[in-house]
Amino acid sequence: MIINASHHAKTMHARRNPNLSVSSAASASLAPSSLSSASFLSPRVGSHRALLSPSPPPSPSLPSLIPRHGKKASSSHSRLVRRLLIAFCGVTIIVWLGVRRLLTTESYYPSEYSGGSGGEDYEMVEDSFLPQDPSAVIVTDEKGKSKWTISIPSSYGFPLQPSQYQEICSQSMELSRQLSETGKTLSKRMRGYYQEDPWFLDVQEAEEQGLLPSSQPSGKPDALVDDVAMTEDQSRGGDGMMVCEKSLTYVMETSDAGFGKSLMGLWMSYGLARKEGRAFFVDDARWPYGNYSTYFARPPSPGCLPPPKSQILPCPHTARHIVVSTATTSHTFGHAFVEEFEDGRKMRVQRQHNIFALLREGYESLFTLRSDDAKYVTERADALYGPITEAGGMSVGMHIRRGDRHPYEYQYSKDYLPLDRYIDTAREILVAHFENSTKSRKSKSKTRALSSLAEDLAGEMASKLVLASDDPDVYTNPEMSQVLRAQDRIILASKTTLEAATPKKHRYIDEISGWEGGFFRDVFWSLGQPVSTANAALETSKEITQEVSEQAMRLRELVGRAYLMDLAVLAKADAVVCTVSSVGCRILAVMVGWESAIDGGNWKNVDGDFDWRGIQW
């Protein structure tokens, strides 16, 4: 018997009962009773009958202005207030009971399921066949117990669509709830990040018990990034390595066109995989920036082969083989992840030390640029920072993000931070650095102290500011006249610059489009598209599987490579100034390192009083 969760409308919950009838009580009429005779009435009764004779009613007396002795005057206002108070108390009690029951029921379920399909309802449907679409199902194991697992038909490729991953996790949450209620194992505490669901049956175990069809050997997915060992094994026929016992596959995809989110998710997933002893794989099938190898060297080899695609699940996190993508970020790095890895004994940014360590491990293992870009970054850093270091100066990098990313600070939340805030913060870092250097030399003799002071002044004069920005106009701003550009291998030009270099062929036709105002998602999706079809490209920008032309992909690759080289050069500076609202800013902190960036204060956020944080889902 197989039970799967199928979506249905909320109105299906109300079912009519054909046996339900409404009965009404018959009203009884009273027959008038006759009186026997007037002779049976006593004189006393007869005297009272005279009172029943028709006569004008007595005149009503006027109400007294003074209340009767011992009684309070009745007040309709006070009665209304009492009734409202009683009604309010009743409603409050009912709401409290409802919320309490909801919390005691919902708090049992793991938070990695959060971020589901938004209140959709599922109905348990009993069937003798597996569903044709990927979904969570209930099966009966070899011990006769009902458990839930995930069925992914072999006809589906890898990776699934983001909506399918979200649907699977929502169904899984519902099936786990149903089995928990049946088994009467509800708990009032939240399940931890690594606490296993007693009702979950892993796909591999379900296949071994004959509850799911055996996975067909499909080989390596086409878009899985090769490492050296995997390539050598394929050249030998694929029989040299065994399938990994546990694995994590990171799917590089994004719907908002940001390179930084993909990079942050890549590093965090790698660090988590190493922490949990999982093999790590990268899939770039739907990455809008193209191939992983266009930007980076091959990832480290896990020493084993990837599992069958039907065994790679989006949830729960305790499964043998899991996938992390845009659709599953809130499941893998949600509340339960934060509670597991944050240090509750510390305050503010110090709580994030363990999460920072996961990202740092991913950076150290995966951030190896392609050979030509890596060579350029090394030469550029030596040319920029070498003379500054020799002169005793200090270099401060500034990362200015504009475009569709606005600051957290409320005053500038609809605009951008002024440029002088970056420059002033960078100068404060320089002044503080050389002041501390001077104070440390006060114990020396006057001659040596004067010499050291002269060296500090010379070093302060030799210090330089290095800039990287997604807005080309920032480089030409008068306030940045003394600032050095981080890299000039790939430059994003504005329309003004392009028009100056390439005169118009037609005076009244706007033929040139530049990179205006910074990185905008819609501009990215329309790169390489003809002007006539640019609007159509924006309409399909939300589709992750959107196919683009070769020219558009080359432009996207240039944007991505420029972004990476900017970060690589800035990270080699002595200090960095940026806005924490930008993913690139938080990435720079990881590249600088915890000791220097956080403990040493060489990473400065100028966007309000906010601390460094990891993935924000």
Image (spheres, rainbow, N blue to C red):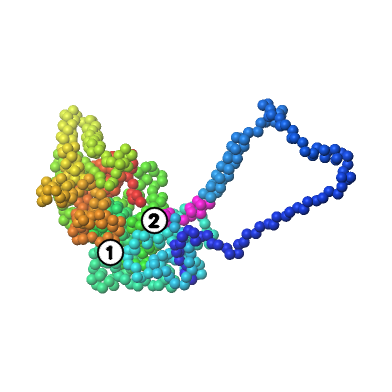
Toward the viewer: 382 or 287? 287
Residue 91 in the figure: left or right of residue 192: right
Label 1 sits on what residue type? Leu
Q: What distance separates the C-alpha of mark 2 from that of mark 1?
A: 22 Å
Which portion, as a residue range, is magenta?
100-118
Q: Dot 2: within a 10 Å radius of its alpha carbon, few (fewer than 14), some, or many (20 or more) residues?
A: many
Label 2 sits on what residue type? His
Residue 343: x and y in percent read 39, 47
Mark 1, residue position: 224
The residue shown at (21%, 53%) is 559
Toward the viewer: 447 or 35? 35
Mark 2, residue position: 331
The label on residue 32 is none
Relative height, residue 35 to residue 184 (above, below)? above
The residue shown at (33%, 39%) is 410
Residue 8 in the figure: left or right of residue 447: right
